[in-house]
Image: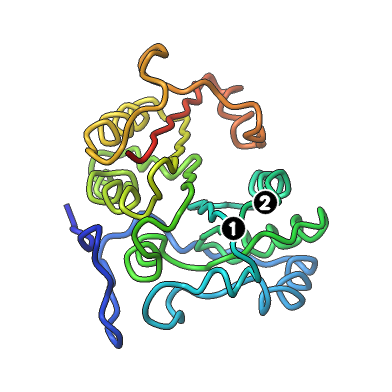
Amino acid sequence: MTPILPPDSQVPAGQTHRRSVVSFVRRGGRITVGQQRAWDAHWGRLGRDVAELPAGPLALDEWFGRVAPVRLEIGSGMGEATALMAAAEPEVNYLAVEVYEPGLAQLMLRATGLGVTNLRLLRGDAIDLLAEHVGPGSLAGVRIFFPDPWPKTKHHKRRLVRPDFVALVASRLVVGGRLHLATDWAEYADVMLAVCSAEPLLRNEFPEEPGGWAPRPGWRPMTKFETRARDEGRVCRDLMFVRV
């Protein structure tokens, strides 16, 4: 397993932390005319590149223009669910990190169309973001919905949800903050449950439910991806763990 930084660490000024094995593929893909317009109009205000951030924790209160609980979504994809969830929680400072540029552009297009003002976007590696630019105990919640399951055994080392990553996430949550995961890949769901259950800073919010899975929350939007997974016979599972 390729280690990440210890949960309470910050990278010293002038240094960068990069891993040889990452959990994502930097896909290509052509940006549409509408997405390009959204990028040109809004990225300068709403978005930043993780690799270009100054050393130390992000000044989120300044970026959002207010003090409010911060919820981080890792892997916002094309933004179908993210824009709706940010719109449903105007009292929260909603932060989304994604590596796919057309996805970020589409998210800005969706969010501005909904009149969302409490959303900021980051392009880059979520682990670098958490390790270098998010301080301990500063997040009200972290959401990771349908991360790449990397189904081949030889690729399991690329999976995002593993003990060192979960320890890092847990350290960034406030006491009472929630880590919420969802996946349609049964074997990966079992791994997620085992890894999160073994983290001493986390407690399963629904231990009494069958298998320890959380009921699917009605507020989590049903995306085209999840609908397709269900149509293909894959069961979607949610897990919710609270920082103790």
The spot of residue 44 in percent (x, y) is 66, 79
Spatial CA distance of label 1 from label 2 is: 7 Å
Q: Residue at x 42, y 77 (%)?
A: 51
Dot 2 corresponds to which residue? 91
Residue placed most toward the observer, 161 or 139: 139
The vertical placement of 48 against 97, above or below, is below
Q: Residue 54 in the image: state x and y as whole percent.
A: 43, 83
| Residue 111 appears left or right of 48 | right
Location of residue 125 with respect to 179 vertically, above or below: below
Q: Is residue 131 left or right of residue 113?
A: left
Q: Farthest residue in the bottom direction?
A: 14
Residue at 38% x, 45% y is 175
Q: Which residue occupies 65% across, 60% down?
A: 119
Residue 196, image x and y in percent? 30, 35
Q: Report the quarter where the C terminus lies.
A: top left
Rate crowding at label 1 as few (under 14), some (14 to 19) or many (20 or more) other CA atoms within 10 Å: some
Label at residue 68: 1
Residue 101, by quadrant, is bottom right
Residue 2, x across and y down, in percent: 19, 57
Label 2: few (<14), some or many (≥20) within 10 Å? few
Q: Which mark is residue 229?
A: none
Q: Earlier in the sequence, mark 1 or mark 2?
A: 1
Q: Amino acid at mark 2?
A: Glu
**Viewer-proximal residue among 198 and 90:** 90
Give the tally of numbered discs: 2
